[in-house]
Structure formats: C-alpha cells, structure tokens
Amino acid sequence: MKLKPSLIVGAMLLGATALAHAQMTIYGLVDVSYGKSIADDAADRRADIHSGGDDGSSQGNSTSRVGLKGAVDVASGVKMNFRFETGGITSGGEVNPGGAFFSRQAWLGMSGALGEVRVGRQDSVPFQTMVGYDFNGASNGVSALGYTGVGPWTRGRQSRAVQYIAPTFFTGLSTQFGLVLKGNSAVPGAKDVFSGGARYETGPLSGAFTFQTKASSAGKDFLAIGGTYDFGVAKVMLGYADGGKVADGGTGRGPSVGVVTTLAGYKLGALAAQNSDSGAKSRAAEIFVNKEIFKSTYAYGEVGQFKPSGGSSATGYAAGIIFVF
C-alpha cells in the first residue's frame, strides 16, 4: 500500500514531537592515548596508540563509547527513563568485538516522588556507590585498586537487574538497592543476588558502605567501605574491600588509599592498594595528572605498577586525550 504524502509528513511530525517530549540525549566519550596497560607489560607487548575500547576496554584511562538516554513524562510527577550505552569502541571502529552491542547499559526505569526503579543491564550497586572514591576514575590500564582486586567498587555490571534508588530523605544521604534473580542460571548452586549501598556527604567528609551477596554456593559475599576527607590543600581516601578468601571462591581482601590535589589547574594524585589474602597477595600503585585543556576536553598522563606475590612487577602507562560530549 502506498502511503499518502500527508500521512508521511504527519508521521514525521509526530516522531519529532515524541523525540522532543522524550528529552532524549546522545552522549559519549572518546579516549585516545599512547602507551600500554599493566597487562601488556606483563605479556611483553609494546606500547602503541590506543582507543579506550581496545583489548576489552583495558587501555588508556576511560572506555570510548556512545550512549542514548532520555526521560518521558507519563503522568503527573512520574517519568519513564531509559539508557542504552555501547561497549568499548576499538581503534578499528568495532564495538565490543564478539560481545553485546549495548553491553554497558540497557535499562528502563520509572521515577517519581518515591524514588526510581530500573530494570535491565546496569552497573552494580557497589560500583555506583563506591567508584567515586577512586580519584583516577578506575583507570582501564593502570588501576591499582582494580589490578589488586580490592577496590571498593570492584563488582561489575549485571544483566536482568532490578534496582531501587531511594529519594533523599536526609540531606547528604543517598541509598540504593539491587536484586538479580538466579532465574535460568546454569551456574551450579546459583543464588539470588542482593546488594545495597549507602553514601553520606557533609562538608569536607564523605563515607560509604556497600554489600553484594554471592551469586552461587561456591562464591563469596562482598563488603566494602570507603571515605574521603577534604583538607583544602588535598583530599585523602581510605577504603577496604572484602570479597572473601580466594581459597573459598572469593577475590581476596585488603585496603586502598589515595590522595589528590590541584596545582596550577592540574589535578595530581596517587592511589595504592594491597590484597592481603594468601591466595591473591599483591600490591599496586599508580600516579596520575590531568587537566581540562579545552571545553569538555581533558589531557592526562598516568603510570601504574602491579606486583603479584612471587611474580615479577609489571608497569603500565598512558598519555592521552579524553573528549566528552
């Protein structure tokens, strides 16, 4: 059936109206750098020019990606929200090679006076609660907290997750809860996964606590705490994560520390962490510098070293540009 021109124009106008009504935004980040990750150095790979999505998004500081998000008023005081975000975009233009296209975010949510509920693929509650305590943004290539496995944010994304973000009943306090049903999981002894997080900020002080229960009978629960204090001349961070003993199916446990300051417009900082578990004993440190050189454009440099127990140290580094849009 041939559509009349008037119907086509009408459909286009309705589509444009819906887009405006949805307040839809296309956003993204592009990280281009020269260097090599700690994993590269351990594998005797040479430094190269990278996108933040190369090698499973393990290069540079941040993951190159593009996303789509929006909100629609569906009733008085009620909004439907959505977000879709691609996996890492490689130097060759591929998106998360061999994996899902929207591997970072793919969820639908509803928000109102009682808070927000989201369903779909999204960052875990521990990650959302604690990642702000990593002053270098959980660097892809040199993260001391990530390589040791004791970062308070070290629980990744979850699919088919239901999360509830509570409204702010008390100034400075934010809380969030999550659930992933075991459903049709093929993992032996699969369990429902519950998580929660709370963060409180007042003046120069910030503190947070988070937990996530084990996904199977062979796994271990995860607990983490963190805090920062801004002394004016510098901000310091202390954290601790417990993912259970490696011998029992966990990821280890240990402390993390950090400091960051600003000097002549440059953000300078350092982070260190240690996994104290006998089955994953290791330590790592990183230093970094970054500065906004143009609007939404940041230059950065970072160096990190990882030392596993009984193994050789590996060192990674990167110098790059991040453009956010």
Image: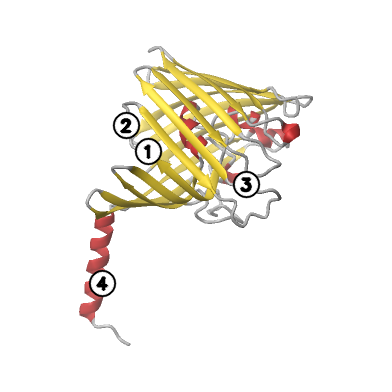
Q: Residue at x 22, y 51 (%)?
A: 76
Q: CA distance from mark 3 to mark 2?
A: 32 Å
| Earlier-in-chain disc, 4 versus 1 | 4
Residue 143, can we see it?
Answer: no
Residue 191 circle label? 3
Residue 296, can we see it?
Answer: yes
Quarter of the image for residue 219 reads top right
Between 110 and 6, the one lying in front of the other is 110
The residue indicated by pointer 1 is 166
User: Mark 3: which amino acid?
Assistant: Lys
The residue indicated by pointer 4 is 11
Residue 90 at x, y percent in the picture: 55, 49
Q: Residue furthest bottom?
A: 1
The residue indicated by pointer 2 is 169
Residue 35 at x, y percent in the picture: 59, 34
Q: Residue at x 63, y 54 (%)?
A: 185
Look at the numbered disc 2 and give the secondary structure of its residue: loop
Label 1 packing within 10 angstroms: few (<14), some (14-19), many (20+)? some
User: Mark 1: which amino acid?
Assistant: Ala
User: Mark 2: which amino acid?
Assistant: Phe
Q: Residue at x 49, y 54 (%)?
A: 102
Q: CA distance from mark 3 to mark 1?
A: 25 Å
Whether residue 69 sits left or right of residue 6 in the image: it is right
| Earlier-in-chain disc, 3 versus 2 | 2
Between 259 and 172, the one lying in front of the other is 172
Look at the numbered disc 1 and give the secondary structure of its residue: loop
Tag 3–tag 1 contact (CB < 8 Å)? no
Whether residue 19 sits left or right of residue 86 in the image: it is left
Between 81 and 269, the one lying in front of the other is 81
Which tag is nearer the camera, tag 4 or tag 1? Answer: 1
